[in-house]
Structures are given as C-alpha cells and as structure tokens.
Amino acid sequence: MPASTLREKIMDKRRFKRGAGVLCHISSLPGPYGIGSLGSAAYKFVDFLAKSRVKYWQILPLVQTGYGDSPYQSVCCNSGNPYFIDLERLAREGLLTEEELEGARMPAGRVNYGELYKSRYATLRTAFSRFDISTPEFKEFVNSGLFDDYALFMSLKTRYGGTFRDFPRAYKHREGLAVSEFRRNNYANEYCFWQFLQFEFMRQWKALKTYANANGIQLIGDIPLYVAADSSDVWAHPELFLVDEDLNPTAVAGVPPDYFSATGQLWGNPLYDWDYAKSTGYRWWIDRFAHAYELYDIVRLDHFRGFDRYYAVPAGAPTAESGEWRNGPGLELFEAAERALGHLNIIAEDLGVIDDGVVALRSATGFPGMKIMLFAFDGNEGNDYLPQHITENSVTYTGTHDNDTAYGFVKDMPHERFEHFKKLVRAALRYEGVSYPLVTRTEAARALVKCALGSRSDICIIPIQDVLGLDNSARMNVPSVPSGNWQFRLEEVPGRQVAAWLRNAVKSSARL
C-alpha cells in the first residue's frame, strides 16, 4: 500500500481522545514488600486517577528485569516482572501462609534490588511448591507456548548461571533433542516454576487492567525497541539479530553524543537483522505487537527513530562515538503489522537526534510524537516544544522517566537563569490563556504542569513526581549512570487533596 494511501486511511482513526494522564511505574507504588506490586495499592492508584478525572495511566515496560534492574533490559521482551506479583493474592489462594507473608516484608523506601533478588524468588518458590500444575487453566497456559522459550531459558540459567553464551554447547545453540530432553527432565519443577510466575503475573495484570478500564482509565504501556543481549529472545531467535557464529553481537545499539552524554550512550543491545525480518513478513514483530495489545490499550514505542535509521556501534567499542547510522525497516513494518492486527494505538517516542527521515516516518504512520516541557524554554523561538508549535496529534509531558523532575529542574537554577526562565514560561501561559502565579520555584514547577496540560496535544501525561512537586531525589533514571536508578517509590497513594488539585487542573485545561 502506498504511504499516502496508508496515511489517508489511518489519520482519522489515529487521534486519541483529549485527556490527561499520569506516569507512574508499578515498581513505584507503595507497599510492604520492597517494591510496588499488582496488589491493593495498584487498585487504590486507579481510584486516585479516577477521582482526579484523568483518562490515562502510563507505565514503563512490565518486563522481568536483568542485570542493572532496568525495565529496558529484560530477560524476555514479553515477560512480566515476577517482583510485581501480589504476594497477598497468593496467600488468599492458599499458596503462602501469614507467617511467610510477614517474612517477605521489607523496609519502606527506595527499592533495594539486591535484597529483593535474594529473598523474593525464595518466597515465590515456596508458593509454587503448593501450586497444582495439573489444573486445566495452567496446562492450557503452558501449552500455548507463549513462555516456552522464557521458561527454558530461565531454567538453564538457574542450572548453569552466567549468560546463555556460557551454556553447554548443545543448549547454547538450542539443539532440538537436547532442549526437548532438558524440558522433559525439568518440567515439573524448574520449567513449570517459571511458567507459574508468568501465569500468576498475567492473571493479576489482566484483572488490574479490567478494573482500570471499568473506571474509565486506559493503560499506556511501553515497548523498548531493543532486547537485552542476554535474553531468551536472542537465544531462541539468533537469526533475527546481527550476531556471529558464537552468538556474540557484531554491532550493538546506542546513540551518538547528545544532550545527555558527550560520548553518546552505549546501550549494548544486539541489533536486528532487518533484511531477515523482512523475509519473514516481520512475523516476530507482529507477534510482539499482538502480545502488547493484550496488556495495554495504547503502546508507547520507545526509540521510534530506530525504525527509520538506527545507530550501530562496533562490538567492543568503549564509547558510542565510533558508531554509524544504518537504515531501519521504515514504514513497511507498520504496514505489515496493521494488515495483520488492524489499527495500532501507538505513541512514537521521537526524542533525541531527530532528522527529516524520522519526521517523515512519523507523518506517514500518523502516530503522535512526544513533546517535553522541560526542553521548551531555551530561548529559541523556533523550539518545537513551545506551546505555539505543538499540534493536536501529539502527547505532551512535563518530562519523562529520563529527565529531572519539574521541581528538580528549576530548584537549582542560578538566579539570573531562573528569572529569564519565568519570563518564557509566563509568555507560554499567556499564549495558552492560562493564568497562574509564577514567583517562587515551587510555583514555577507547577506552572510547567499547567503549561503541559494547557497545550493543544490530545494527551498530556504528568509524571507522578510532578503531580506531587517532588525534587530530583525522586528522579527515576539518569541516563548513562549505571547504578541508583529505577528505585523511586511513593510513600503512599496520593489522597483526596492531591486528587482535588489534579482534578481542578485537568478541568481548567478542558481535559475532562
């Protein structure tokens, strides 16, 4: 189908209903077990969103994290994070005792992933020891094959440790007879344990999604472009990636030097063999999208620019400075996906180094791009993120999980810069017809929220840190910093006063 025809067909369907949303990952929810879960606090958070009259809840990738704890580096791109399983529901199902629940408690505050790793899987194994793997529902789940690669991969990692490149050769190269024998010998214990984790996660997630949707809240999920080098995805489908005969990447993903880093960002993910993907009709990607739409109402497609051109860094390079740009699949991937699945609700994360090719691809698909208020007020009248340049088919944020909080952004500004910043924000508010006091730094952070909500974007998403006016101690991630990230947690689900403030802000921006 020609690009122009596709665009004409989908543009009238692509637009989202005008509304506001909140960005808060599951890990950031409060609770007594060391990390947010799909338990009671998640349902209370939905209630808070409904009282606030917002229409969208955005989260980060739900996946099981690996080394470094980043939701953008997973052992399986379709997995659910076992840490998010509600232990109290397992207790209600008779799989944990009250004493075991008490033993699983952890101190309040930031996520301690090291301690969580030491203790949580032991608790989940205890629950599994009481689980009946012969139930028809569980057998149907296992036989669907959705998590066969994952369960085999995690079982082998439990047995042999290290990365999959450290597996014995027959398992490393996934020789059919050897893998079948391993599955059979480990089926009732290790293999079904990992299936059990995904079974419980998916049941709990779908129940939460049903509750959110019933309360008028749509869920915005997040698909990373790349998968981790040590993942079941690369192990099970090496033909999809640029790897050598020993399954080592020949080039890895990253971005060139930019706003975040003078040497670029070296992500280390293996790159796709897009020629091979095309020869299969992009089947793997279509399956990945299909799974995503079982979990989410809308998908934020991370690093959208990589579908136009992607940055390839030679394997082993110490920084991302020596990389080169290569052509991605472009429009035909999304055409293939929409032929197979129908209309795709996608938000294109089009931040970073954006050129005409990325703009053309986003325009051809009709996907809304992202606008960031923290990037708007640099004094450049042509800045794309200024309200006068924002169009309806877009999604405006104060900031993302990779940015300062709004208050953190303004808190430590030198006085002269802050005074100039206030003038720029006042002008933007006047343009939007918004009246808001702007003297103190606290008011300046709130003004950024009001400015984002007042934009023409169909959707406006405010991180929970900015709803609460928190400083950078609550920041979620600092790109290129290898530790201390993804640990932010709420002390409690916001109450009536916060809901009332947010509801009034939503109402005044005509986003009810």
Image (tube, rainbow, N blue to C red):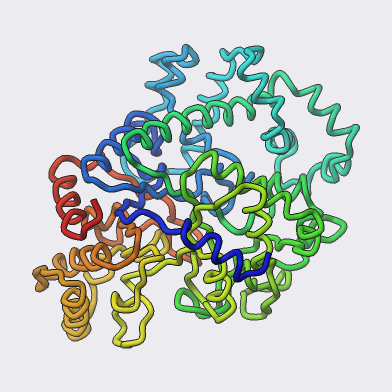
Instruction: Identify which residue, 396 or 353, lies in the foreground.
Output: 396
Q: Quadrant of the N terminus?
A: bottom right
Is 326 on the left or on the right of 225, as rendered?
right
Q: Is residue 443 left or right of residue 483?
A: left
Above or below 419: residue 92: above
Q: Give me the residue at 23% from left, 68% from top.
A: 451
* Left/right of residue 425 with respect to residue 38 in the rendered view: left
Tell me if residue 242 comes above or below residue 190 in the rendering.
Answer: below
* Above or below for 298 versus 321: above
Quarter-of-image position of residue 357:
bottom right
Q: Residue at x 73, y 34 (%)?
A: 152
Total labels: the figure holds 0
Q: Residue sitting at 16 percent across and 76 percent down?
A: 430
Q: Position of residue 319 (x, y in %)?
A: 62, 74
Q: Position of residue 7 (x, y in %)?
A: 56, 66
Can residue 404 be seen here? The reply is yes
Q: Is 259 placed left or right of 293 in the picture?
A: left
212, 243: nearer the viewer = 212
Taking 487 as reference, is 404 above or below it? below
Residue 491 seen by the camera = no
Counting from the top left corner in percent of width and height, residue 305 is at 57, 70
Residue under the point 18% across and 73% down? 429
Q: Position of residue 121 (x, y in %)?
A: 54, 30
